Amino acid sequence: MIKMSVYYSADGGSTFDHDYYRTRHMPLLQERLGDACLRYEIDKGLAGREAGSAPEFVAACHVYAPDLATFQEALAPHRAEIAADVANYTDIAPIVQISEVVEGQGKSGCAL
Amino acid sequence: MIKMSVYYSADGGSTFDHDYYRTRHMPLLQERLGDACLRYEIDKGLAGREAGSAPEFVAACHVYAPDLATFQEALAPHRAEIAADVANYTDIAPIVQISEVVEGQGKSGCAL
């Protein structure tokens, strides 16, 4: 399993509309990706290492897919539409990362 | 639900032992945190936005906890031990971030 993570640096811009991101942008991305999106997760930055310190990232998302080829094929036809929607919630240029999920385990018994 | 994410920048150092991290360090952290660790996930960086590009982070982990106070109380007595183990797998100074998980959903029906 792989995931695409998108990070919005706290010092990278001045605005981030968490509500739009959660209720409009990410559901749009999920809908366009279809079965290539196994699930997704949204982070809202709270702090750095110490409580009360500034977080490195104001927000992030993680989109889980079975493999890289499946994800890229599903995203390709919709890249322009997804990119055009970014201006609706932030002026931060995001960092995009593709990772392999090498371990994901816990007491819930959920493989994801 | 909150999570602590730890990021190891690809340009932050010269070594990262993924095997040690997966089989020794993260199980140690999970064991010390006990019930405060709902689950954890390990990322291995593959690429940036484009396939074949360098990833921003060579590795990352995400530790999920019910709330910040529970997590901090569980970690406090073990911080020194956990920190001392880092030199066994990397020379990269990590970025630590605390985030609120504002959305985590998918087709598996798993809340995590």
Image (cartoon, coloured by chain):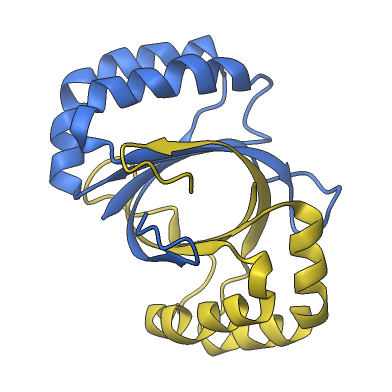
Chain colours: A blue, B yellow
Which quarter of the picture shows residue A81? top left
Relative to A4, does residue B86 appear above or below in the rendering?
below
Horizontal placement of A2 versus B105: left or right?
A: left
Question: Is A67 in front, or is B74?
Answer: B74
Residue at position x 63%, y 70% in the image: B93
Residue at position x 52%, y 63% in the image: B39
Question: Is A14 in front, or is A32?
Answer: A32
Relative to B108, does residue B24 appear above or below in the rendering?
below
Residue A107 location in percent, x, y? 50, 66
> Which quarter of the rendered picture does the N terminus of chain A lie within?
bottom left
Residue A47 location in percent, x, y? 75, 47
Relative to B97, does residue B20 appear above or below in the rendering?
below
Residue B74 location in percent, x, y? 77, 71
Q: Is residue A3 visible?
A: yes
Residue B50 location in percent, x, y? 26, 41
Residue at position x 61%, y 22% in the image: A18
